[in-house]
Image (cartoon, helix red, strand yellow):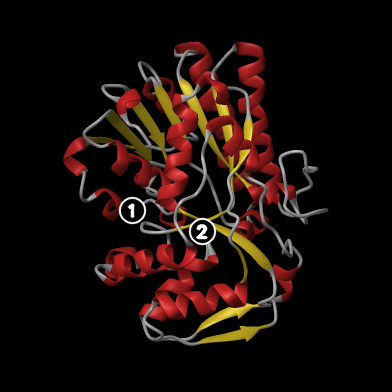
Amino acid sequence: MNLEWFAGKRILITGGLGFIGSAIARRLAGVAELTLVDSLIPEYGGNLANIRSIEEQVRINISDVRDPHSMRYLVQGMDVVFNMAGQTSHMDSMADPDTDLEINARAQLSILEALRHHNPEARIVFASTRQLYGRPGYLPVDEEHPIRPVDVNGINKAAGEQYHLLYHQVYGIPACVLRLTNTYGPGMRIKDARQTFVGIWIRRILEGKPFEVWGGGQLRDFNYVEDVVDAFLTAAGDPHADGQVFNLGSDEVVSLKELADLLVAANEGTGRYEIREFPADRKKIDIGDYYSDASLIAERLGWRPKTKLAEGLKQTLDYYRGGMEAYL
């Protein structure tokens, strides 16, 4: 990804201390003028360790995207907003739907209102999710697949992305939506499974403990975080992305058991896992097999993932092996 377009631009990253937001910041550090906004609420994944290598090159604002007054101030003068802030836990969304609504829907509307009134020319790229498709009616899932979420998180993320598209159509705000599949890599939450189940697998294998694989036969695709960063930067810098929705995904489709075997192999063949039945509460919102058709973003913007799953898992293990304590 050529970073020349970003040189000297003012960039706001919501959820900027989180997994993907901080990865974008690390890529743009020293190139653009960066402001990272994050609530640092423990459940949501923000971690100062994610920016320790660039902390002198960014401005950090500890505030919550649910505060419209903060966002009104923060969006002013920005050239690009990477809107990464969100509540990602599917189970938390079911246990506390009101909070999920506040973060994933109502706060998104506030951010867009702040842009409409104070900076309508800023480009915004919204991090959405494959979760809003629900249980696939066909595979691979393309952008024309029906939206039929199986949990509160998926419903609210669908609302959040529709707000972005509406504000583009009605007010001309240059907005784009990227629907992420399973993303992994350095900076991901590993203390629990709130962000992704791969995180807790990473933690337990490095602690020398067995990890649990629920089911095992479900098919999934995965993107390494640096490839996802490429997609966000590409979308931000290309007017052809305006008003569009794109799936991210991979042609490398594996079962969860195959993923577990790849993780053990990436850990120099060391590690154990146990295949278990899905817990009843998780089974109700499990989507079964899922993998994306990401051909549209390849055709329109030229993005394709580059990192093979085996290599990405190795790099992720190496990262946490060198400093896991900051993430626990």
Please name whichever residue, 16 or 182, is drawn nearer the observer in this view of the structure: 182
Badge 1 amino acid: Asn
Compared across the picture, whether 96 is left or right of 289 comes to left
Q: Is residue 92 above or below residue 15?
A: below
| Residue 37: x %, y % from top left | 36, 36
Badge 2 amino acid: Gln
Q: Are the residues flagged by discs 2 and 1 in contact, CB closer than 8 Å?
A: no
Upstream in the sequence, badge 2 or badge 1? 1
Question: Quarter holding the C terminus?
Answer: bottom left
| Residue 90: x %, y % from top left | 63, 57
Q: Look at mark 1 in the image and give the residue it sits on.
A: 47
Q: Is residue 213 above or below residue 168?
A: below
Residue furthest left as drawn? 56
Instruction: Specify the quadrant of the image occupied by residue 109.
Output: top right
Q: Is residue 71 visible?
A: yes
Compared across the picture, whether 15 is left or right of 133 comes to left
Q: Provide the secondary structure element on which disc 2 rests.
A: loop
Q: Is residue 190 visible?
A: no
Residue found at x 53% / y 62%: 196
| Residue 149: x %, y % from top left | 75, 49
Residue found at x 36% / y 56%: 187
Residue found at x 80% / y 43%: 146
Q: Look at mark 2 in the image and give the residue it sits on.
A: 195
